[in-house]
Amino acid sequence: MAKITVVCENSAGPVPGILGEHGLSVLIEQEGTTLLFDTGQGKSILNNLECLKKDPGRIGAIALSHGHYDHTGGLKQVLQRCGPVDVFCHPGVFSERFAVIKTEVGNTYRSAGIPFQRAELEALGARFIFNTAWSEIKPGVYLCGEVPRTNAFEKDDQRLKVRASDGYEQDTIADDQCLVLESAHGLVIILGCAHSGVINTLNHVTAQFPGKAVHTLIGGTHIGFLSDDQIEETIQALKQFPLQKIGVSHCTGLVPAMRLMQAFGERFFFANAGSVLEIA
Protein backbone atom coordinates (compact mmCIF):
# COMPACT_ATOMS: atom_id res chain seq x y z
CA MET A 1 0.00 0.00 0.00
CA ALA A 2 1.31 3.43 -0.95
CA LYS A 3 -0.15 6.58 0.54
CA ILE A 4 0.43 9.65 -1.63
CA THR A 5 -0.17 13.06 -0.08
CA VAL A 6 0.13 16.35 -1.95
CA VAL A 7 1.94 18.65 0.48
CA CYS A 8 2.47 21.79 -1.63
CA GLU A 9 0.47 22.97 -4.62
CA ASN A 10 -0.89 26.22 -6.04
CA SER A 11 -4.21 25.72 -4.26
CA ALA A 12 -5.10 24.13 -0.94
CA GLY A 13 -7.80 21.69 0.07
CA PRO A 14 -10.06 21.56 3.13
CA VAL A 15 -7.36 20.90 5.73
CA PRO A 16 -7.34 23.47 8.57
CA GLY A 17 -4.40 25.84 8.23
CA ILE A 18 -3.00 24.38 5.00
CA LEU A 19 -1.63 26.93 2.51
CA GLY A 20 -1.31 27.13 -1.26
CA GLU A 21 1.75 28.36 -3.13
CA HIS A 22 3.07 28.21 -6.69
CA GLY A 23 5.02 24.97 -6.41
CA LEU A 24 4.74 21.24 -5.89
CA SER A 25 5.69 18.70 -3.26
CA VAL A 26 4.35 15.17 -2.80
CA LEU A 27 4.91 12.78 0.12
CA ILE A 28 4.95 9.02 -0.54
CA GLU A 29 4.58 6.66 2.43
CA GLN A 30 5.09 3.02 1.60
CA GLU A 31 6.02 -0.05 3.67
CA GLY A 32 7.50 1.93 6.53
CA THR A 33 9.47 4.35 4.33
CA THR A 34 8.77 8.02 3.64
CA LEU A 35 9.95 9.70 0.44
CA LEU A 36 9.48 13.38 -0.38
CA PHE A 37 9.23 14.22 -4.08
CA ASP A 38 10.04 17.92 -4.58
CA THR A 39 9.78 20.59 -1.88
CA GLY A 40 7.71 23.46 -3.31
CA GLN A 41 9.23 26.94 -3.22
CA GLY A 42 9.57 26.98 0.56
CA LYS A 43 6.63 29.17 1.56
CA SER A 44 4.40 26.44 2.92
CA ILE A 45 6.11 23.06 3.20
CA LEU A 46 6.76 22.91 6.95
CA ASN A 47 3.40 24.50 7.76
CA ASN A 48 1.59 22.05 5.49
CA LEU A 49 3.43 19.00 6.80
CA GLU A 50 2.37 20.03 10.30
CA CYS A 51 -1.24 20.57 9.21
CA LEU A 52 -1.23 17.16 7.56
CA LYS A 53 0.24 15.64 10.74
CA LYS A 54 3.37 14.50 8.91
CA ASP A 55 6.67 14.64 10.79
CA PRO A 56 9.45 15.98 8.50
CA GLY A 57 11.95 14.20 10.73
CA ARG A 58 10.62 10.89 9.41
CA ILE A 59 11.46 11.69 5.78
CA GLY A 60 13.93 9.00 4.78
CA ALA A 61 14.82 10.20 1.27
CA ILE A 62 14.16 13.11 -1.07
CA ALA A 63 13.83 13.08 -4.86
CA LEU A 64 13.79 16.16 -7.07
CA SER A 65 12.03 16.31 -10.41
CA HIS A 66 14.15 19.19 -11.75
CA GLY A 67 15.98 22.31 -10.66
CA HIS A 68 13.33 25.04 -10.71
CA TYR A 69 12.84 27.12 -7.56
CA ASP A 70 9.19 26.08 -7.15
CA HIS A 71 10.26 22.44 -6.76
CA THR A 72 13.48 22.94 -4.77
CA GLY A 73 12.94 26.08 -2.67
CA GLY A 74 11.86 24.17 0.45
CA LEU A 75 14.83 21.82 0.35
CA LYS A 76 16.91 23.68 2.90
CA GLN A 77 14.08 23.79 5.46
CA VAL A 78 13.37 20.09 5.04
CA LEU A 79 17.04 19.14 5.38
CA GLN A 80 17.22 21.10 8.62
CA ARG A 81 14.55 18.78 9.99
CA CYS A 82 15.47 15.41 8.46
CA GLY A 83 19.13 15.47 7.38
CA PRO A 84 21.39 13.68 6.76
CA VAL A 85 19.43 12.08 3.93
CA ASP A 86 19.87 10.86 0.35
CA VAL A 87 18.70 13.34 -2.30
CA PHE A 88 18.10 11.70 -5.68
CA CYS A 89 18.19 13.97 -8.73
CA HIS A 90 19.75 14.75 -12.10
CA PRO A 91 23.06 16.70 -11.97
CA GLY A 92 21.38 19.45 -14.01
CA VAL A 93 19.35 20.57 -11.00
CA PHE A 94 22.07 23.10 -10.21
CA SER A 95 21.93 24.79 -13.62
CA GLU A 96 21.53 28.58 -13.58
CA ARG A 97 18.04 29.18 -14.97
CA PHE A 98 15.85 32.10 -15.95
CA ALA A 99 12.28 32.89 -16.97
CA VAL A 100 11.55 35.61 -19.53
CA ILE A 101 9.26 38.34 -18.23
CA LYS A 102 7.85 40.56 -20.95
CA THR A 103 7.45 44.24 -20.07
CA GLU A 104 6.52 47.39 -21.99
CA VAL A 105 10.18 48.24 -22.45
CA GLY A 106 11.39 44.76 -23.38
CA ASN A 107 12.23 41.45 -21.79
CA THR A 108 13.67 40.99 -18.34
CA TYR A 109 15.09 37.73 -17.01
CA ARG A 110 14.08 36.47 -13.58
CA SER A 111 16.10 33.79 -11.83
CA ALA A 112 14.13 30.52 -11.85
CA GLY A 113 16.69 27.98 -10.64
CA ILE A 114 17.37 26.28 -7.34
CA PRO A 115 18.02 29.06 -4.78
CA PHE A 116 20.84 27.25 -2.97
CA GLN A 117 24.40 26.19 -3.62
CA ARG A 118 25.23 22.51 -3.50
CA ALA A 119 27.78 23.01 -0.70
CA GLU A 120 25.30 24.62 1.71
CA LEU A 121 22.82 21.80 1.15
CA GLU A 122 25.49 19.18 1.71
CA ALA A 123 26.45 20.97 4.93
CA LEU A 124 22.88 20.31 6.10
CA GLY A 125 23.18 16.61 5.35
CA ALA A 126 22.15 16.29 1.70
CA ARG A 127 23.83 13.26 0.14
CA PHE A 128 23.29 13.88 -3.56
CA ILE A 129 22.88 10.79 -5.71
CA PHE A 130 22.78 11.82 -9.35
CA ASN A 131 21.25 9.96 -12.26
CA THR A 132 20.71 10.71 -15.92
CA ALA A 133 19.20 7.34 -16.87
CA TRP A 134 16.37 5.21 -15.53
CA SER A 135 17.14 4.45 -11.88
CA GLU A 136 15.52 2.37 -9.12
CA ILE A 137 15.96 4.47 -5.98
CA LYS A 138 13.94 2.22 -3.65
CA PRO A 139 12.43 -1.22 -4.28
CA GLY A 140 9.63 -0.62 -6.79
CA VAL A 141 10.27 3.15 -6.88
CA TYR A 142 12.03 4.74 -9.84
CA LEU A 143 13.25 8.03 -11.25
CA CYS A 144 12.80 7.99 -15.00
CA GLY A 145 16.02 9.76 -16.02
CA GLU A 146 16.20 11.94 -19.12
CA VAL A 147 13.07 11.68 -21.23
CA PRO A 148 13.50 11.26 -25.01
CA ARG A 149 11.62 13.90 -27.01
CA THR A 150 10.00 11.67 -29.62
CA ASN A 151 6.72 13.27 -30.68
CA ALA A 152 6.26 16.30 -32.89
CA PHE A 153 3.71 18.29 -30.90
CA GLU A 154 5.26 18.60 -27.40
CA LYS A 155 7.56 21.59 -27.57
CA ASP A 156 9.79 23.47 -25.14
CA ASP A 157 8.37 26.39 -23.16
CA GLN A 158 9.92 29.39 -24.89
CA ARG A 159 9.84 31.47 -21.69
CA LEU A 160 12.48 29.32 -20.00
CA LYS A 161 16.14 30.11 -20.65
CA VAL A 162 19.69 29.40 -19.55
CA ARG A 163 22.58 31.80 -19.83
CA ALA A 164 24.70 31.56 -22.99
CA SER A 165 27.98 33.22 -24.01
CA ASP A 166 26.10 35.86 -26.00
CA GLY A 167 22.99 36.21 -23.83
CA TYR A 168 20.35 33.55 -23.24
CA GLU A 169 19.27 30.38 -25.02
CA GLN A 170 16.44 27.88 -24.72
CA ASP A 171 16.44 25.73 -21.58
CA THR A 172 15.52 22.20 -22.65
CA ILE A 173 15.38 21.13 -18.97
CA ALA A 174 17.13 17.83 -19.57
CA ASP A 175 16.96 17.15 -15.82
CA ASP A 176 13.16 16.80 -15.96
CA GLN A 177 12.19 13.52 -14.29
CA CYS A 178 9.09 11.82 -12.97
CA LEU A 179 8.74 9.38 -10.10
CA VAL A 180 7.28 5.94 -10.85
CA LEU A 181 5.78 3.47 -8.37
CA GLU A 182 4.84 -0.12 -9.12
CA SER A 183 1.53 -1.25 -7.66
CA ALA A 184 -0.73 -4.28 -7.88
CA HIS A 185 -3.07 -2.29 -10.13
CA GLY A 186 -0.43 -0.89 -12.47
CA LEU A 187 2.04 1.96 -12.62
CA VAL A 188 1.67 5.17 -10.65
CA ILE A 189 3.43 8.16 -12.25
CA ILE A 190 4.04 11.34 -10.26
CA LEU A 191 5.06 14.31 -12.40
CA GLY A 192 6.94 17.39 -11.30
CA CYS A 193 6.26 19.57 -14.34
CA ALA A 194 6.69 17.16 -17.29
CA HIS A 195 8.80 19.73 -19.13
CA SER A 196 9.79 16.99 -21.57
CA GLY A 197 6.11 16.55 -22.42
CA VAL A 198 3.62 14.44 -20.51
CA ILE A 199 3.13 12.09 -23.47
CA ASN A 200 6.87 11.74 -24.06
CA THR A 201 7.15 10.94 -20.34
CA LEU A 202 4.39 8.32 -20.39
CA ASN A 203 5.87 6.67 -23.48
CA HIS A 204 9.30 6.58 -21.84
CA VAL A 205 7.94 5.03 -18.64
CA THR A 206 5.76 2.41 -20.31
CA ALA A 207 8.70 1.33 -22.48
CA GLN A 208 10.42 0.20 -19.27
CA PHE A 209 7.46 -2.01 -18.29
CA PRO A 210 6.21 -3.98 -21.30
CA GLY A 211 2.70 -5.22 -20.65
CA LYS A 212 2.09 -3.03 -17.60
CA ALA A 213 -0.55 -0.31 -17.74
CA VAL A 214 -0.42 3.15 -16.22
CA HIS A 215 -3.08 3.16 -13.50
CA THR A 216 -2.59 6.63 -11.99
CA LEU A 217 -1.10 9.91 -13.22
CA ILE A 218 -0.66 12.75 -10.76
CA GLY A 219 1.15 16.10 -10.70
CA GLY A 220 2.08 18.95 -12.98
CA THR A 221 1.70 18.58 -16.76
CA HIS A 222 2.86 22.08 -17.85
CA ILE A 223 0.16 22.31 -20.49
CA GLY A 224 -1.18 25.48 -18.89
CA PHE A 225 1.58 27.53 -20.53
CA LEU A 226 1.29 26.09 -24.02
CA SER A 227 -0.88 26.49 -27.11
CA ASP A 228 -4.48 25.33 -27.39
CA ASP A 229 -3.48 22.96 -30.19
CA GLN A 230 -0.85 21.29 -28.01
CA ILE A 231 -3.32 20.98 -25.15
CA GLU A 232 -5.84 19.24 -27.40
CA GLU A 233 -3.24 16.91 -28.87
CA THR A 234 -2.10 16.06 -25.35
CA ILE A 235 -5.63 15.22 -24.23
CA GLN A 236 -6.25 13.01 -27.24
CA ALA A 237 -2.95 11.20 -26.68
CA LEU A 238 -3.72 10.72 -22.96
CA LYS A 239 -6.94 8.96 -23.92
CA GLN A 240 -4.83 6.19 -25.46
CA PHE A 241 -3.56 5.20 -22.02
CA PRO A 242 -5.82 3.12 -19.73
CA LEU A 243 -5.70 5.65 -16.91
CA GLN A 244 -7.97 4.90 -13.97
CA LYS A 245 -7.08 8.08 -12.06
CA ILE A 246 -5.67 11.37 -13.31
CA GLY A 247 -4.99 14.07 -10.73
CA VAL A 248 -3.39 17.15 -12.22
CA SER A 249 -2.08 20.22 -10.45
CA HIS A 250 0.46 23.06 -10.35
CA CYS A 251 1.53 23.99 -13.91
CA THR A 252 -1.44 22.32 -15.60
CA GLY A 253 -3.57 25.45 -15.32
CA LEU A 254 -7.22 25.67 -14.34
CA VAL A 255 -8.72 25.87 -17.83
CA PRO A 256 -6.72 22.88 -19.18
CA ALA A 257 -7.58 21.00 -15.98
CA MET A 258 -11.26 21.52 -16.65
CA ARG A 259 -10.79 20.24 -20.18
CA LEU A 260 -9.16 17.14 -18.73
CA MET A 261 -12.09 16.75 -16.33
CA GLN A 262 -14.48 16.81 -19.28
CA ALA A 263 -12.37 14.21 -21.09
CA PHE A 264 -11.88 11.80 -18.17
CA GLY A 265 -15.01 12.31 -16.10
CA GLU A 266 -15.02 10.49 -12.76
CA ARG A 267 -11.44 9.34 -13.26
CA PHE A 268 -10.28 12.96 -12.91
CA PHE A 269 -9.48 14.76 -9.66
CA PHE A 270 -7.67 17.99 -8.89
CA ALA A 271 -4.54 17.22 -6.85
CA ASN A 272 -4.32 20.30 -4.64
CA ALA A 273 -2.44 20.56 -1.37
CA GLY A 274 -4.06 18.19 1.10
CA SER A 275 -5.15 15.62 -1.47
CA VAL A 276 -4.53 12.02 -0.39
CA LEU A 277 -4.49 8.97 -2.64
CA GLU A 278 -4.02 5.39 -1.49
CA ILE A 279 -2.82 2.79 -3.98
CA ALA A 280 -2.69 -0.92 -3.13
Image: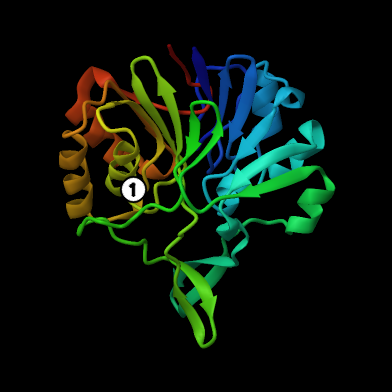
Q: Is residue 17 visible?
A: no
Residue that sits furthest to the bottom in the current view: 166
Along the viewing direction, whichever of 253 and 141 lies nearer the viewer: 141
Pointer 1 residue: 224
Above-or-below relation of 42 to 132 = above
Q: Residue at x 43, y 46 (%)?
A: 193
Q: Position of residue 49 (x, y in %)?
A: 66, 25
Along the viewing direction, whichever of 140 and 273 lies nearer the viewer: 140
Above-or-below relation of 48 to 23 = above
Q: Position of residue 200 (x, y in %)?
A: 29, 49
Quadrant into which the C terminus falls: top left
Indicate the quadrant where residue 126 lies: top right
Residue type at mark 1 is Gly
Q: Residue at x 23, y 47 (%)?
A: 231
**Image label count:** 1
Question: Crowdedness of circle 1 by 10 Å Cα count: few (<14), some, many (20+)?
Answer: some
Along the viewing direction, whichever of 132 and 274 lies nearer the viewer: 132
Q: Position of residue 241 (x, y in %)?
A: 21, 32
Q: Is residue 130 visible?
A: yes
Residue that sits furthest to the right in the current view: 123
Along the viewing direction, whichever of 195 and 13 lies nearer the viewer: 195
- SS for tag 1? helix
Q: Residue at x 46, y 52 (%)?
A: 176
Indicate left or right for 148 with 49 as reference: left
Q: Position of residue 57 (x, y in %)?
A: 77, 25
Q: Residue at x 50, y 55 (%)?
A: 175
Above-or-below relation of 23 to 30 = below
Way the structure is coloured: rainbow
Above-or-below relation of 70 to 82 = below
Indicate left or right for 18 with 280 as reference: right
